[in-house]
Image (cartoon, coloured by chain):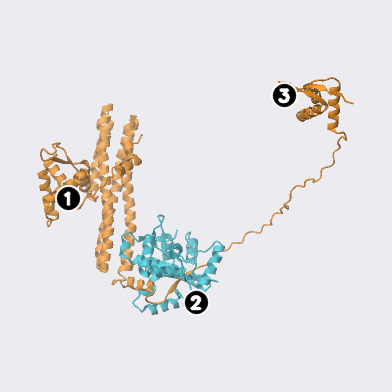
Chain colours: A cyan, B orange
Amino acid sequence: MSGPGFERLEDVIADEAFPELDLALRRGRHVDRDDGPWYTLLVEAEPLLVAFYRRYDAELIHRSDGYFFLLPTSDRLGRRHLSVADMLVGQALTLLYLDPATVQHGGVVDRDQLLGQLATTLGTDALVRALNPKRRRYDERVAEQTARAKVQEAVRRLSTLGFVELMTDGRLRLRPALLRFAEPVRGTADPEAELSRLVAAGEVALAPDDADAADADRGDDEAAADSAHEGGGDDDGGEDGP
Amino acid sequence: MAQDPSLDPNRLLASLVERRVTLDLGTIDLCFVAALYVRAQGSGLTSFGEQELVGLFEEVCARVDPAAENLRKRATHAIQRLRDQRMLARIDGAFIARAGEYTLSRLASGIVEFFLHEEALTPESLTLLTRTLQISLDEVAAAARAAQTEHDWHTRVHGPLRVTVTDLVAGIERRQRGLDVQQEALQKEIAELLGADWFGAVERCQGLLDRTSATLRELNEVLLRDTHQLHASLQDVLELCVERGNAEGEEITHRVVEQVDRIAAWGSARQQAWSDYYQYVHRYLRDVVRLDPTRALTERLRAQLSGKTGRAFALTVARAPSMQLLRDVVAPPERPPVKRPRKKREEPPEVVSAEDPRARLEARVRQLIASGVTSLAEVTARVADEVREDERFATAGRVAETVARLAKPRADRERPWRPIRDGLEIEEWALWREEPTG
């Protein structure tokens, strides 16, 4: 168990919750109050752990919204960028998180609400096209089916990163880390300037232009095919790794 | 314990579907039924005349919908609707002879009672109920100690346990359900307040949350304190039942213990659930509402998601590769090559007699015929004796063929079958030896 504050890094590492927490942070997990002992350990050992992870060229970030995450600043630790589907779904979930109607159910939404939010904000056609970027001509039914599957996959990936919690009944509990998706528009500053600041800080990466995007999509396809072949396939985002 | 057949869900549902049971009560109808119930209870009436029904309906309309017109006509329709749905029953049997007398059915009374008793638990009502329950249980325990006869047990222990105590516990449970409904409504109200007034609703939401939290905390404290005492009293009653071998009392007490357990479990579960909700809403008010008093963030985020403003971007997250553990080096076991046992393709030659068996058979048959044997059965039997058992059947056929060739069989009209050896039977022929001609 973690004590009330730590004086030495050795004590932090010796804490029984540390190994799992460390692995989770290195895999991109966002940790908030609902994570109980992990969050407590991070709060109590924050100064020591910030210095510890800086040696790996990674920043342990603590947001005032009540969550921590690890942000690699070089390629020493692996890092990656979320895919288009992850970003769309993440932003739609953030809109639901901000919606006062969600308060009635304690921040729990179902998948239909998520799809409804996406369809309302983007429009059904734009949503289907965004989630089927490589298909110029497609069967409507198949494309919608693919879009739904991609949304499901994105939700699963976001849950492994601590943005949402998958409940046993299939519903989603929204977590405060979702507010990361709203970072560029949160402040009073110009969103473009805010976005540039976040890019400079390494917190986000700008999406490539259309031509680059097509190349990236092809690359994603190959990577997805490779990972599926290897039995992986847990993400289809861009990746920078050592 | 056998289940009541009327509680069989298949039968119950089939019966409801077959009868096409529906309930369709508007607010006015419901108010009308409630007014009838209250009037019946207040005045000790068991039935209402038609004029009373119409009068009461007009009173209800005057309070609920003062602008309503054609009240008598509407009353007629309302009465008919209630009769169709078996809420109001005509009980006089006079039919057309005179105006009817009506009474509320059990269904209508049940509906009104539901709304009358839909009370929520409060610390005051809970304390009152648990104290009354405690007094009743103490009396039951005292009665159990003093009970001498079976009649004493029935009247002073089983009866109060089954009726008074069970009703009091059920009363607490009913109020718990009422509080659950209130909490749901409160959650809805908080969401609506935020939806309507956003930043302006923060203080009111805070107040609602704090009040409910305080109520739940008090309720849980009362439950924790009182259920302990209730359990102690029930344990006394249970021990007395066991001591006196009173199985019925034991069963009833167990049932009450389960009910009390349920009440206590409700308290802690609700407090936990409310605590989670309370924390969530507090965080929401602090992190979302207070930091975005004009609700601009939602609009800006919506514009960002729809691509109307800004450039598309992707969040960066850590992704340490999984640690790779190399397996221990293990020399692969030597596997024998796949092969199958070889079989000799050519069998070695077998030494056989050069003598022709057919010629030998023919010679033997010829010899027997020459010796004067005049019956096919006898020839066959004697030849068969000289061959192996498995060859006898085939040999019999060959003998018949040879005999037919060498001698002249005489075929009678009736040709009997004669057994020879080992269940073998053949058709009997009498033989004439053919004299060589020339």
Q: Which residue is mark 3?
A: B423
- Say what amino acid the circle numbered 2 marks: Asp
| Left or right of residue B6, residue A131 in this image | right
Q: Nearer the viewer, mark 3 or mark 2?
A: 3
SS at mark 2? helix
* In the image, residue B16 above or below residue B407: below
* In the image, residue B187 above or below residue A118: above
Instruction: State which chain disc 2 sits on.
Output: A
Q: Which residue is mark 2?
A: A212
* Quarter that holds the C terminus of chain B: top right
Taking the spot 23% from the left edge, 44% from the top edge, the residue there is B129
**Are both tags, 3 and 2, on one chain?**
no
Local packing at callout 3 (Cα closer than 10 Å; few below 14, some 14-19, many 20+) is few
Local packing at callout 1 (Cα closer than 10 Å; few below 14, some 14-19, many 20+) is some
Report x, y in % for residue B53: 12, 45
Report x, y in % for residue A25: 47, 65
Instruction: State which chain disc 3 sits on.
Output: B
Report x, y in % for residue B111: 22, 46
* Quarter that holds the N terminus of chain B: top left
Taking the spot 42% from the left edge, 79% from the top edge, the residue there is A196
SS at mark 3? loop
Comparing B392 with A9, the one in front is B392
Q: Which residue is mark 1?
A: B31
Taking the spot 34% from the left edge, 54% from the top edge, the residue there is B272
Report x, y in % for residue B132: 23, 42
Quadrant assignment, res B286 = bottom left
